[in-house]
Image: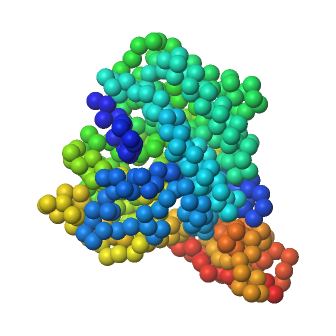
Amino acid sequence: MIFKHIYNRSFLVPAIFSIFLVLLIPGCGKQSAPERYLIGAYYYLWFPYNFNRRGYLRKFLNPSQTPVLGVYNSSDPAVAERHIAWCSRYGIDFLVIDWWPNRPQQNEVLEAGFLRAENIDDIKWCIFYETQSLGMDRATGSIIWTDRRIERFASDLLELSGRYFSHPSYLKIKGRPVIFLYLTRNFSDKTQAAIKKVRSVLRERGVNPFIVADEVFWTVTVDGGEKSTFSGWTEAPQKSRIRLFDAITTYNIYETLKHNHQGYASGSRYLPEVEEIYQRYRELCGDEVLFIPNIIPGYNDRALRPGSGHYVIPRQWEDGGTSGSLFSELFERLGVAYIDQKIPIMMITSWNEWNEDTAIEPLTPAQPTARDSSGSGTRFTDGYSYSGFGETYLRIIRDKVVAVAGQVLDERGNPVCGITVEGWTGGKLAASDETDTGGYYRLPRPLMGEGGYRVTVKGRDLHRMVKVRKDRAMTGVNFRLF
């Protein structure tokens, strides 16, 4: 029973975001415009440990595949710099970074690597608090809030508040620091007391956190209020618990027992059933709670959990489709379709969760293969094809959310940051953006529909005429300053 409710994460451990949202980034970092989709992705700091352990699907393909950065180390700032540069250039606005109550060495990697990236101003980030690390009840699969765990939870968030919430790039919604909580759908017993305690201790420090809960799922624990016993599981969304949070989402809607979701999504029940549950939860949110849809590029944990025989959701929408075709369909039909117009955020699982193969981080380009190194040759792939997809997923994101993109260089060909690039139509300003550390800018698609635009460098006699398409970003609209 416990595995039914937690089997959409990787547990390779030793033993055991009104439509207006401004992400303020100083210096050469980006400033987002209103009326744009804000794209976030879950980001992990457990490498190379999780590369080297059993369970890395791409490692067992025949031939094997690796990320463009190879078997990298999360503590290397250069790795984070490459990741941030990709995100900033292609349209990912923020990263939600895992933080574990009981993994101090892994948590240290955040400061040793990611926060030392020279281009940290080009991205927003926030903490993803792994609540299950506080302890789960093995008999019920729930996270039972004892007084001791509540105190630890509050203490951790107080520490995180002091350590990170004032960081210039920390994600804030309407001035409130954001924190994501994993597995709130498994919370049991004194949940109200736990959340109230956290808000109380942070309020004393002058902090009003914006809490995003992993609440949307097929079965959730019954909210027993302040009862001290486990109240069971239900398919009904728990409105009283949802009201404790500022936003709800799902980390990953994949459920091991829903076998009608297996295979190509064009012929399975995955999309219609996820649409149904998204609609149910979004309506329940009303005006008080933000709904944040989540999409995946696919799912395969068969190398991570070889004894479980879990079904696969391949990365192709249909048999014979291209890698990324599922992601493109879900982006529109689950992401854009269910995004909350109060604050239009969409989450992606994930940037680099390679163990469940939900990562969109660039892979070294390679031909597709359905073969693996198992005895049968298909134990891990389950007969589905996997390609070294390069930057496919980043290009899909860019085409969905960016109208015009390019780079600004100086007379020597070096990138220039902090330069404002504008898109004009009919004598009116439609959109603008500032170049990042790499000199790249992107003008958001929601502000620039199909048609002709004059793209200019603010304060300089430089312009280009472009025609915006509805299905693809106009890229390479570059400028050189003389």
The location of residue 79, given as percent across then percent down, is 55, 63
Residue 431 on image: x %, y % = 72, 66
Q: Residue at x 49, y 35 (%)?
A: 102
The image shows a total of numbered marks equal to 0
* 90 lies left or right of 365: right
Q: Residue furthest right?
A: 459
Asked if residue 194 can be seen in this view, the reply is no
Q: Is residue 241 above or below residue 465?
A: above
Residue at the farthest left position: 376
- Please identify the quarter of the rendering in which residue 3 is found: top left
Whether residue 387 appears in this view of the structure is yes
Which colour scheme appears in the figure? rainbow
Residue 18 appears left or right of 182: right
Which residue is rendered at x = 59% and y = 43% of the image?
Answer: 127
- Tell which of 87 and 165 is nearer to you: 165
In this orientation, which residue lies closer to the viewer: 103 or 341? 103
Q: Quadrant of the C terminus?
A: bottom right
Residue 466 left/right relative to 224: right
- 78 or 22: nearer the eye? 78
Q: Is residue 95 left or right of residue 217?
A: right
- Image quadrant occupied by the N terminus: top left
Residue at image position (60%, 31%) is 156
- In this picture, is 337 found above or below 279? below
Q: Quadrant of residue 451?
A: bottom right
> Residue 258: image x %, image y %?
27, 42
Percent from the top left, x then y, of residue 113?
59, 55
The residue lying at 32 percent from left, 76 percent from top is: 367
